[in-house]
Amino acid sequence: MSDGPEGTSGTAAAPANAPRRATISDVAREAGTGKTSISRYLNGEFGVLSPDLRTRIEAAIERLDYRPNQMARGLKRGRNRLLGLLLADLANPYSVEVLQGVEAACHALGYMPLICHAANEVDMERRYLQLLTTYRVEGVIVNALGVRETMLKPVGSGGIPAVLVDRTVDGLDADVVGLDNAAAVRLGTEHLLARGYDDLVFVVQPFEQVSSRREREAAFRASMQGTKGAARGATHVLDLHDEATTEAALATLDAHIAQAAERGARCALFAANAPVALRLALHLKAALGEQWQQRVALIAIDDPEWAALAGITTIRQPTREIGYRAVEFLHERIEGAAPAARAAAFAGELVVRASTLG
Amino acid sequence: MSDGPEGTSGTAAAPANAPRRATISDVAREAGTGKTSISRYLNGEFGVLSPDLRTRIEAAIERLDYRPNQMARGLKRGRNRLLGLLLADLANPYSVEVLQGVEAACHALGYMPLICHAANEVDMERRYLQLLTTYRVEGVIVNALGVRETMLKPVGSGGIPAVLVDRTVDGLDADVVGLDNAAAVRLGTEHLLARGYDDLVFVVQPFEQVSSRREREAAFRASMQGTKGAARGATHVLDLHDEATTEAALATLDAHIAQAAERGARCALFAANAPVALRLALHLKAALGEQWQQRVALIAIDDPEWAALAGITTIRQPTREIGYRAVEFLHERIEGAAPAARAAAFAGELVVRASTLG
DNA sequence: CTGTTAGCGCATTCAG
DNA sequence: CTGAATGCGCTAACAG
């Protein structure tokens, strides 16, 4: 394995046999003029070009199939319209939906997103962050994993402008956009309670540096607090990246469910996100059989495409909007606006399905 | 909406208030030497640097938090280690899995993938292809939608080196990597036949420019040919992007299923890919109820995460490997190798689940 | 309206 | 071993 395009690595060879593309000079020569006019044409300063010249330029560009080199432009202008998008886990549908919003916004605002996938590995994340820096992206949208770095611009001066998605970064004062976790969890809990479930267990991945997990769990506990003991509430942690402990946790969960049944309590599982929900559903199906939904209720934050098929009640996030807003925030900062760090918390929407019929 | 970073658009403003990053000159000054030495250090030519100088450089870099500018390097060297990855549809799990393979390979080979998402729109695709060209990517991996363009390098000279994933492009002589469609479909058909189903219907999206859809359908017909009429075979087209026609097609399908039941035939649906399978399952569940699987069998190419939960038999593609191989092919071409266009067809793996229990 | 000049940040001859 | 000079493709003053 090479060191990657990070720079501090081995010498790179020449560009093979690439049939060099036309440059601005070629076009200028072809059109019988200077590079400046070409540049002006490229930048839409048509008011400053005689119709004749303009036509010649157009023809020359066409003939040479010329394409301005963004790298060179960026070098000169000081901005390359590149935006970094660092995603913790693309396998999570949430990420790709956010990505879609980001793309839409980039398209609208004239940016080109440089998408990086940390695949749940903290050092990949760090590595990509450096890489992005190296490509001089004008800003980054981070769905953080564990960045603790000072790489990100703390809203004030310093690093590169950043906006956080879904998760905040400890001690980093930056814009954040995501779900209104407290409200979303309350929505779910109340739904469950209203349906008559009185033994709720919140299932979440290890908190680690992920603020949203912590927030959701806290919100769950707070919601249960409100019931004055009329209903039980417990939290179980599921480490999806460690099959062994997952199995153990699942076994504990099974025991909990069995006990609840004996007590005559009505048990409901609250998955903190889609990956957890899937794992849970898979397990319940295996452990309780095809009809597991008649034994335990399940609700989840996130609304993956399979939720409808499996008939699982969810709390859907406006993911596209989250991505879109993130870019807008970033854009403002890039353009120089410097308000205090903002937080955009979108409301979740309860989608009731069979898994919580009561 | 702006034109995006394509170039032929409005003038861009200056970079706001960015606290300019350190350049190689800054480092040189800080280290009390010339830029050349810094450059050498960056490129790992340590044998040519006195230990003392080297230490000073390291210190200077550290102090200034210097990061070489890839854009500038690229400009000079003629190669920027950027690879374009054009995906037709990120909502399709297949794409994100391929992407993971691509990323792994890029990491290993020292490339940085520039990921573009065409979102099933042909002009987005064209647009992105130009954009990639503009950023001077060294090659592109294309999961084509409808590129008919001459933009892509026809293995010989011309455009930019390209390798196709899953789908070939009409009249473009380039490397292709994907599933061995004929074998995969045969695998599925034979499984169905062996399980006693005698009325198979293949469901696929409109062919359009997508070769794999066509190939799979052709393979299906070929497979049925072999049964000498012992079993029926039909093809239904489902245009997922047009709800109206989809509804109509689904109704026709329902009728087909009903008729088969009357005849006492055993009906099985063969989905050409995951999106089709999901739509089908959703519909069947709505139309036939929770127990739909007892009425019709379902098998699909692609193995999305929810297939296990829904108990659907699938033919899994080695998606990661496909992505990985694509990068390897591309890398060879970028490095100058110029063999004739190759095709890597990976075998699919049958994953039997409840939906085809017989 | 148009062309000339000077760098952007870096890698590379080519002389010390 | 080291550094000064040149130019990659392009934009931005600054003159004509």
Image: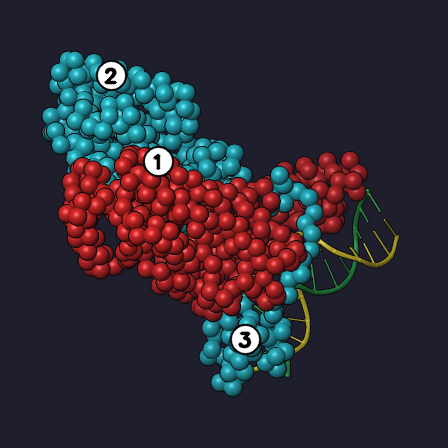
Chain colours: A red, B cyan, C green, D yellow
Q: Residue at x 27, y 18 (%)?
A: B254
Residue A253 can be seen, yes or no: yes
Eyeballing the image, is B100 above or below A4? Answer: above
* Residue B30 rendering spot, x and y as whole percentages: 61, 79
In front: mark 3 or mark 1? 1
- Judging by the rendered image, the residue that carries numbered circle 1 is A352
In front: mark 2 or mark 1? 1
Quadrant where the C terminus of chain B is found in the figure: top left
- Judging by the rendered image, the residue that carries numbered circle 2 is B256
- Judging by the rendered image, the residue that carries numbered circle 3 is B61
Q: What residue type is labelled 2?
A: His
Chain label for disc 2: B
Eyeballing the image, is A247 above or below B195? Answer: below
Query: Could you tell me how far apart the alpha carbons at marks 3 and 2 are, in whole angstroms?
Result: 71 Å
Could you tell whether B115 is left or right of B108 in the image? right
Q: Which residue is drawn at 38% across and 25% down?
A: B239
Q: Quadrant of residue B198?
A: top left
